[in-house]
Image (cartoon, rainbow, N blue to C red):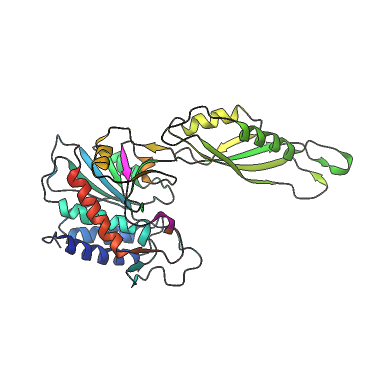
Amino acid sequence: MAKKTTKSALLSHAITLLQGKIAIPAYSGSEAAAATYLAAQLSAAGIASFRIGNNVCAYSKKNSEGKKTLLLNSHIDTVKAADGYTINPFEPVQRSGKLFGLGSNDAGASLVALIESFIYFNTMELPFNLLLVLSCEEENSGVAGIRTVTQELKDIDCAIIGEPTSMQAAIGERGLLVIDGTAYGVQGHAARDEGVNAIYNAMDDISRIRNFTFDKVSPLMGAVKKSVTMINSGYQHNIVPDVCRFVVDIRPNEYYTNVEIMELLQAEVKSELNARSLDNRCSFTPAGHPLLQCVERLSIPTYISPTTSDWMRLDVPAIKMGPGNSARSHTADEFVYLCEIEEGIDGYINFISNLQL
């Protein structure tokens, strides 16, 4: 494979590579075996890689100082197999032009397509440097993943994030903020009209949250979206509850940080609000960036992604683009079409060939 860089050879190698990857369980936090496999496969293809934990990294041979660096990133790990699998999720099966297996679509197809594209360009002189990072712990937002890589590798200027987008370019991602709210009251006997009902206090605050308006509306992402999605209180019919808990799902736009949203909502309510994480921030690439100029030149369809990825853990402009369909992610009998892998390799090579950093 080290000397063969025709697109047909790349596709054949990609399918074999993905089959081997599927056969190795790689749940978030347990990617060591899969990382070792991928590093060995890169070595066999003439790529000198190095490890940062379970992240596999490689610079192309023609890299040089003074050039900007384009990161090619996708993730090694998978979620746990969904209920309802009718096949062994770790046994790659080809049938009717599809490759089945856990992680085949999310994000195995993007992973191998980026690897093959990197192999294709490895010995070429490009106007920018290439850095390949196959990252771990994407699915569980773990600290050992791409965050650890960027702490050590400081030379990244922009990125292509490989996720199943049907090779459309996500030019922004909605953030995610999940808030646990706790309303307090005073326990009492319902028959004697005693106590202070925490459910009523929660209802008042939920109404305030529902009616609260975030003034800054993005032309790119629209308004901040918020929904109360869970509520729980009480354990006996005749006891006025002293605690009521509820959950708020918030999808920010680029005008508000998660910290700002927390501060604004906490000022509106009496309940105690706690964020499960402040790290799932909104991501977007500024207008006029070379990545977006290339997207426009190639007439690649664009959209704002409702899902998050390792993009939110990077502090550089990026696009999210890859083979496969997001609707198949995390589903039983996950699969990717073989033609999608081919389209991914072709699409990445075409994009990198036309990018002007």
Q: Nearer the viewer, residue 151 or 228?
A: 228
Residue 185 vs 61, above or below: the answer is above
Question: Is 301 within the magenta?
Answer: no
For the record, the magenta segment spans 317-327
Q: Quadrant of the N terminus?
A: bottom left
Q: Is residue 45 left or right of residue 255?
A: left
Residue at the extreme right of the image, as rendered: 192
Residue at image location 12% in from the left, 61% down from the top: 4
Where residue 192 sits: x, y (%)?
A: 89, 40
Q: Nearer the viewer, residue 137 or 253?
A: 253
Which quadrant would residue 294 be assigned to in this image? top left
Residue at image location 76% in from the left, 42% down from the top: 241
Q: Is residue 194 visible?
A: yes
Question: Is 323 within the magenta?
Answer: yes
Residue 90 vs 183, above or below: the answer is below
Tell how many labels.
0
Where residue 338 sits: x, y (%)?
A: 30, 64
Residue 83 vs 140, above or below: the answer is below
Q: Is residue 153 visible?
A: no
Where residue 200 sits: x, y (%)?
A: 74, 37
Which quadrant would residue 343 be assigned to in this image? bottom left
Which quadrant would residue 88 be assigned to in this image? bottom left
Residue at image location 31% in from the left, 55% down from the top: 110
Where residue 190 sits: x, y (%)?
A: 84, 43
Q: Is residue 56 left or right of residue 193?
A: left
Residue at image location 10% in from the left, 45% down from the top: 125
Residue at the extreme front of the image, as rendered: 299
Q: Quadrant of the C terminus?
A: top left
